[in-house]
Amino acid sequence: MMRDPSLSVVIPVYNEAGNIPPLAEQLGRALAGWPGRVEFLFVDDGSRDGTPEELRAAESADSRVRVVRFKRNLGQTAALAAGFSLAKGDAIVTLDGDLQNDPADIPRLVRMLAEWDAVCGIRLRRQDGGWKRFSSRIANAFRNWVTGDDTVDTGCTLKAFRRECLAGLELYQGMHRFLPTLIKMRGFRVAQVPVNHRPRVHGNTKYGTWGRMVKGLADVYAVRWMKKNRINFQSELVDPAVPCPADRQSSDRLEKPSLTELLRH
């Protein structure tokens, strides 16, 4: 059972100037009493505004802040994959850098890892425009229909994972939207809980709705193919300590006395 684990919060950011100082402050406040080791790992996805300067200031002000930076914009999946590979915690939390996810929800999700392998947030009162909410619901329903999954809000970045869920997980561009499905495919248990969602105060969304929908159509069929063709041989492995039926039959033949031996007695 996971109890008071060391914790890494992975935050992908791209052109989020104005959001970094309050987010760093809110993270520090939300996890001030966490009994394990904590790090806030910001992955700068090639920002071209004042984000790098704000990240350097946050890193100087708080020893728990770590910053890594891409030379150019590679996308959210790449930023998350880099964060997963560099995170040091037993538990890993993902969080958007736009202040819409609430850091105050993090302790509750991480404590649920005592019973689950991963915990995904559900934005019940989502603070986005009507078209964005509608398109996300349609896309989410389509993803679940094609892949046979039941994730309510795969677009919610606020998630908590046991470290072993992400070990060896190879991500391709756009696959961060399918993290719950990919983890379930590997036999891990996933819970879903309501989380707070807040309106964006600074900046604009970096990923257009139409671009996500077109890319997502191809990705969803790729994930269905992966799920259908995944090789799971672990359940078929034979315990070397347990003899197979052929060996038992051979042993029985060797140990069973002959009729002549029986008549001697």
Image: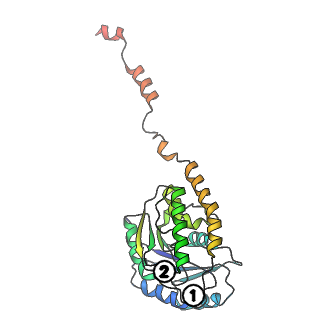
Disc 1 marks a residue whose amino acid type is Glu
Residue 107 sits above or below residue 22 on the image: above
Residue 265 is drawn in which quadrant?
top left
**Residue 248 at x, y percent in the picture:** 42, 28
Disc 2 marks a residue whose amino acid type is Asn
Residue designated by label 2: 101
Residue 12 is drawn in which quadrant?
bottom right
Instruction: Mark 2: give few (<14), some (14-19) or many (20+) Cα within 10 Å.
Output: many
User: What label does residue 219 carry, if any?
Assistant: none
Q: Which type of secondary structure does the marked residue at label 2 adopt? A: loop
Residue 259 sits above or below residue 203 on the image: above
**Residue 45 at x, y percent in the picture:** 65, 78
Residue 31 is drawn in which quadrant?
bottom left
Locate the N terminus and report the quarter of the image it occupies: bottom left
Q: Real-space Cα distance between discs 1 and 2?
A: 21 Å
Residue 63 sits above or below residue 150 on the image: below
Apparent side of residue 39 relative to residue 69 in the rendered image (left or right): left
User: What label does residue 59 carry, if any?
Assistant: 1
**Residue 201 at x, y percent in the picture:** 54, 89
Front label number (1 vs 2): 2
Apparent side of residue 246 relative to residue 98 in the rendered image (left or right): left
